Amino acid sequence: MFLQSPKLWKMLLILAIWSPISHSLHFDLHSGRTKCIAEDIKSNSMTVGKYNIDNPHDGQALPQSHKISVKVTSNSGNNYHHAEQVDSGQFAFSAIEAGDYMACFTAVDHKPEVSLSIDFEWKTGVQSKSWANVAKKSQVEVMEFEVKSLLDTVNSIHEEMYYLRDREEEMQDLNRSTNTKMAWLSVLSFFVCIGVAGMQFLHLKTFFEKKKVI
């Protein structure tokens, strides 16, 4: 049967393991500084993010110095998330345009300077979907649930391959255009050099004729 094929299971598991669609980061940010993180997202992909500042004093409220501003924008400058003076938050949206999306974190300016430890998790594609909710609603068996999750991962990888192929074609077109322009520039530079050399020759010939050297 389809679900009992060991080769299929191996292929699905390998693809799921190697699928680069989730990023979990931990970084430090000093007062008044900004740090940006970029993520390449294809169009019509769901993406979710969650961030929070580590509390250095467990059980106590974070001080006012431990606040950040967060802004998520697309490559064309469209704003998808903006939060001011927060210590945690999350965002979720469906990417309308393909390209690099930027999440920028800015710590509030404080004297003396403090260092904030920030946890940030950014998921795109199949990882952004809550399969646990699907399993609870449908009451499916664990095996069927895993197969659905893996198949969704395979579909996401398949779409990602087409997306990367389109990006590769765009880069090849850009390379060909650049090479053509460089070839024309080389030809133009050659004729300019020939022209300058001819002008110098005529100038020197005229100079030596006036001096009656030749």
Image (tube, rainbow, N blue to C red):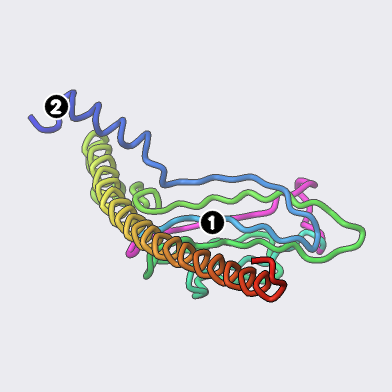
Residue positioned 67% across, 51% down in the render: 118
The reply to whether callout 1 and callout 2 are in contact (CB within 8 Å) is no
The location of residue 158, given as percent across then percent down, is 25, 47
Number of numbered discs on residues: 2
Disc 2 residue type? Gln
Residue farthest left in this picture: 1
| Residue closest to the eye, 213 or 120 | 213
Residue farthest top in this picture: 6
Residue positioned 53% across, 64% down in the render: 193
**SS category of the residue bearing label 1:** strand
Residue positioned 34% across, 64% down in the render: 43
The location of residue 69, given as percent across then percent down, is 68, 67
Q: Is residue 176 above or below residue 205?
A: above
Q: Is residue 16 left or right of residue 83?
A: left
Q: Is residue 138 left or right of residue 38?
A: left
The C terminus, quarter of image: bottom right
The location of residue 39, given as percent across then percent down, is 49, 55
| Residue closest to the eye, 1 or 175 | 175
Q: Is residue 197 magenta?
A: no
Label 1 and label 2: CA atoms lie apart by 40 Å
| Residue identifier under label 2 | 4
Q: Is residue 148 left or right of residue 115?
A: left
| Residue identifier under label 1 | 38
Which is the main secondary structure of the residues drawn in magenta? loop
Question: What residue range appears in magenta?
Answer: 43-64
Q: Is residue 53 magenta?
A: yes
The location of residue 40, given as percent across then percent down, is 44, 56
Name the quadrant containing residue 61.
bottom right
Residue farthest right in this picture: 112
